[in-house]
Image (cartoon, rainbow, N blue to C red):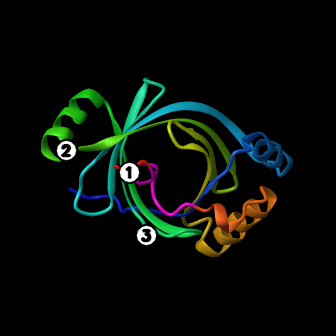
Amino acid sequence: MTTPAARHNLERKSRDADLDSARRSLDGMGARREGTQEQSDLYYHCPTGRLKLRRIDDTHAELIWYDRPDEEGLRTSTYRRVPVADAGALHAALSSGLGVRGEVRKRREVWHWHNVRVHLDDVSGLGRFIEFEAVIDEVSDEAISLVRLEAIGRALGLEGVNDVSGSYADLMGM
């Protein structure tokens, strides 16, 4: 069996209470709004990285494993995403074998600009955040992705003091 290679992205997460201003800035720079999703992320204990089962709008799900340093600012993330046909059965197996760390619920508005996914998140119990993920691939390398992430950060007026180092689960103390 051939295992597909893990994917990589560059990402940044910042606290931001003014998502309306972010929307106007994204629209002004030509970003494309994809829509809004209700997401539930169930985090499991795992020996390396983070493992979560994401349910989106109660219509579909995916298993996501990722590993990245817990530091503020731009950081590299390695990840794998797997579509899930039976989220309930997978959750039962994972929770039995690994145990559940906790659950994060959020309303996520998704935007795209070149190879960058922009997430405007309203996270239950935590507040509002902006997250950028520049997917590194054969068309968009790390150098152009850095330029694009810095451009979005400037356009949205984000300051490093608002950057977040961990995952939402970490911020919730899970």
Q: Which kind of residue does numbered mark 3 sit on? A: Pro
Q: Which residue does the image show at 50% across and 64% down from the upper left?
A: 165
Left or right, residue 93 beside residue 152: left
Q: Quadrant of residue 11?
A: bottom right
Separation of disc 2 and disc 1 at Cα?
A: 16 Å
Which callout, 2 or 3, points at the residue further toward the start of the chain? 3
170 magenta-colored: yes
Q: Give the number of the mark in front: 3 or 1.
A: 1
Q: Judge from the rendering whether residue 35 lies leftward or rightward of residue 22; answer left or right.
A: left
Classify 128 as above or below 12. Answer: above
Specify the amino acid type for callout 1. Gly
The verdict on residue 166 being magenta is yes
Question: Residue type at mark 2?
Answer: Gly
CB under 8 Å between callouts 2 and 3? no
> Observer-nearest residue: 54 or 122?
122
Q: Which contiguous range is marked in magenta?
A: 164-171
Of mark 2 and mark 1, the one earlier in the sequence is 2
Cα–Cα span, label 3 and label 1: 17 Å
Position of residue 83 measured from the top left corner of the image (x, y, whole percent)? 36, 39
Q: Residue 113's spot in the image, x, y percent?
A: 71, 52
Measuring 24% from the left and 51% from the top, which residue is drawn there? 45
Q: Element type at marker 3?
A: loop
- Tell me the residue that label 1 is attached to: 173
Percent coordinates x, y for residue 70 in the rendering: 44, 67
Tell me if 100 is positioned left or right of 6 in this view.
left
Disc 3 target residue: 69
Work out whether residue 5 can be spotted.
yes
Residue topped by disc 2: 99
Q: Quadrant of the N terminus?
A: bottom left
Q: CA distance from mark 2 to mark 3?
A: 23 Å
